[in-house]
Image (cartoon, helix red, strand yellow):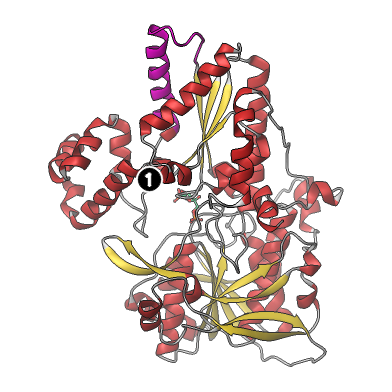
């Protein structure tokens, strides 16, 4: 395989580890835990894995011998920079415990376990992928592991390969499933431990014990670089408004982090829209007013950042989507209805209030809202063109204001959607180190016989040697939520905290950024150079911790 000079240099990078993982390690147990909500229901559903203590790894003088162990690994859901380093950290971790240990990768996500599709990950393969982006070492997929038949089928291959522990690298839904699998295998004494790892560029898998999900750092830095480039172009030509939709599913963490990095003219935060009970028209008016004020200063250009999940947070739209979710889960025959009749059919089935909203939506957005849900029952928000919806509506409002003599200016909009551009980027030093440490920690959790735990590395704004490695029981993060029409135990998603420092910092500055052009151009991620350039965490993480 031909490689670039950067790839060659990057392959030699040795990720940093917390001091506690470098030599001999011991597990220290903390207090017993309980779930964040619905304790009785979650306890009843997870009798074997509920209430376990938080684990912290500390340095130890004792050299314990570990038997060789076969471990399986799965990459689940959307790609996130650093996945290969979780795998290389896991590989190095189990080999350090016993060089005869083996690692098997299941191909193309959880489906690989069920379909018995796997490959052994040897040191030659691992070395090819160290510090690289992507999930291509074994591929990823979105098959939902939830049925007993899938678990039993998976167990057949785990037994055949003598695999005693399975590491599932995924987001909130995949880690929920990891926990269900851990509980099931524990309940039948299958002899297979299951450990989760917090992955997702969306940044919404975090809590008191999981400071950030991996990939968020790199993805936000890549998007911020490109938005910065657009802002420089925009400030040079001074003739376009750029409407930029950013991935992140429901949560607006990516949009907020990019806003903190680039200081755009507008950034919408879905969580605030919901809190303030804003309508679509309120959002459009807010943007149009900024466009008009800037035009009055002679600035007919700007940038608008839009989180991809926005429509789900506009209260009236949220009610519509909730009814549409139930409708799609219950009406299997909908798939058979002719494309040209789908809209009418939906309108005829919805409640009066929701039917009226649905009818008022532009054709294309209405169609996008009724597309299939993903295997976890989520609306595929990345397919909804909110950036076009908003810019069209802003354009219309400005035209009305022009007629009324309230606005003079030119409004010319361009659209972008950033998501896939950043998900497989070469991991930043932060993600390379964090991921390697997460994988190494997972090996320690396995060695200590744990199951139903998520690998956790904390204190991440300090230098890596001071990071705190350990494990958090996954049940601790759970609550009951409605999914595909039924109440299910799921890991609680972390949305943007409107009382948190990242949002407050943005809110204090946004008026200034709206009217005055205060753009920041972050430039590309740097891998080699001074630590203050190369090793910085995201602004979100920094503000949350200081
Ligand atoms: P995960 O939650 O699986 O990490 O998904 C991340 C994400 O990139 C979201 O931001 C986005 O909405 C979704 O994946 C897109 O899904 P797909 O990769 O199937 O197009």
In this rendering, does residue 99 appear at all? no
Q: Which residue is mark 1?
A: 312
Say which residue appears at 45% left-offset and 32% top-offset: 387
Q: Position of residue 78 (x, y in %)?
A: 50, 54
Residue 406's place in the image compared with 107, above or below, is above
For this rendering, which residue is in front, 228 or 269?
269
Q: Position of residue 162 (x, y in %)?
A: 53, 86
Q: Residue furthest left?
A: 348
In this rendering, does residue 290 appear at all? yes
The quadrant holding residue 461 is bottom right
For this rendering, which residue is in front, 91 or 299?
299
Q: Does dot 1 land on a helix, a strand or a loop?
A: helix
Q: Residues within 10 Å of mark 1 (few under 14, many from 20)?
A: many
Say which residue appears at 45% left-offset and 64% top-offset: 492
Residue 430's place in the image compared with 529, above or below, is below
Q: Which residues are magenta?
A: 387-411
Q: Position of residue 71 (x, y in %)?
A: 58, 79
Residue 18's place in the image compared with 225, above or below, is below
Residue 20 belongs to the span the image colors magenta: no
The quadrant holding residue 154 is bottom left
Helix, strand or loop: magenta stretch: helix
Say which residue appears at 22% left-offset and 33% top-offset: 359
For this rendering, which residue is in front, 69 or 406?
406
Q: Quadrant of the C terminus?
A: bottom right
For this rendering, which residue is in front, 297 or 489?
297
- As drawn, is 302 to the left or to the right of 519? left
Say which residue appears at 49% left-offset and 8% top-offset: 408
- As drawn, is 488 to the left or to the right of 78? left
Image mark count: 1
Residue 410 belongs to the span the image colors magenta: yes
Q: Position of residue 140 (x, y in %)?
A: 50, 59
């Amino acid at each position: 395989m031909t490689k670039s000079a950067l790839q060659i240099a990057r392959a030699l990078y040795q990720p940093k580890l917390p001091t506690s993982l470098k030599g001999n390690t011991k597990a220290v147990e903390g207090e017993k835990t309980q779930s964040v909500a619905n304790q009785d229901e979650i306890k009843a559903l997870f009798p074997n894995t509920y209430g376990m203590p938080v684990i912290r790894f500390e340095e130890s003088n004792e050299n314990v011998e570990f038997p060789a162990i076969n471990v399986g690994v799965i990459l689940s859901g959307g790609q996130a920079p650093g996945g290969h380093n979780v795998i290389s950290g896991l590989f190095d971790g189990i080999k350090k415990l016993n060089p005869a240990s083996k690692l098997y990768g299941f191909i193309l996500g959880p489906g690989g376990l069920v379909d018995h599709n796997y490959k052994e990950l040897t040191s030659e393969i691992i070395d090819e992928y160290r510090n690289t982006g992507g999930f291509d070492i074994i591929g990823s997929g979105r098959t939902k592991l939830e049925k007993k038949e899938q678990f039993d089928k998976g167990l057949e291959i785990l037994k055949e390969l003598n695999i005693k522990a399975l590491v599932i690298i995924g987001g909130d839904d995949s880690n929920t499933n990891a926990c269900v699998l851990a509980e099931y295998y524990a309940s039948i004494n299958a002899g297979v431990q299951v450990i989760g790892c917090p992955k997702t560029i969306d940044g919404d898998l975090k809590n008191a014990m999981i400071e950030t999900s991996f990939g968020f750092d790199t993805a936000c830095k890549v998007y911020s670089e490109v938005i910065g480039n657009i802002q420089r172009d925009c400030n040079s030509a001074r003739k376009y408004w750029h409407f930029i939709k950013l991935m992140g599913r429901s949560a607006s963490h990516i949009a907020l982090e990019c806003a903190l990095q680039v200081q755009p003219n507008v950034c919408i935060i879905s969580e605030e829209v919901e809190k303030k009970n804003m309508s679509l028209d309120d959002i459009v008016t807010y943007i149009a007013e900024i466009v008009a004020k800037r035009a009055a200063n002679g600035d007919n250009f700007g940038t608008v950042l839009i989180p991809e999940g926005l429509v789900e947070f506009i209260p009236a739209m949220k009610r519509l989507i909730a009814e549409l979710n139930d409708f799609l889960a219950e009406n299997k025959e909908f798939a058979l209805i002719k494309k040209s009749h789908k809209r009418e059919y939906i309108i005829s089935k919805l409640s009066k209030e929701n039917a009226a909203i649905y009818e008022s939506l532009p054709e294309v957005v209405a169609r996008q809202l009724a597309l299939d849900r993903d295997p976890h029952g989520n609306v595929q928000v990345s397919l909804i063109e909110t950036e076009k919806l908003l810019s069209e509506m802003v354009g219309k409002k400005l035209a009305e204001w022009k007629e009324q003599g309230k606005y003079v200016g030119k409004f010319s909009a361009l659209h972008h959607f950033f998501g896939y551009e950043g998900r497989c980027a070469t991991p930043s030093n932060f993600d390379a180190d964090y991921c390697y440490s997460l994988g190494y920690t997972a090996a320690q959790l396995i060695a200590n016989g744990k199951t139903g735990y998520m690998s956790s590395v904390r204190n991440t704004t300090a230098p890596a040697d001071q990071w705190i490695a350990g494990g958090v029981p996954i049940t601790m993060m759970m609550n009951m939520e409605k999914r595909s029409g039924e109440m299910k135990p799921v890991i609680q998603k972390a949305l943007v905290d409107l009382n948190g420092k990242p949002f407050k910092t943005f809110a204090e500055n946004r008026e200034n950024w709206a009217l005055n052009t205060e753009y920041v151009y972050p430039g590309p991620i740097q891998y080699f150079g001074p630590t203050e350039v190369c090793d910085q965490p995201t602004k979100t993480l920094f503000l949350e911790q200081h």
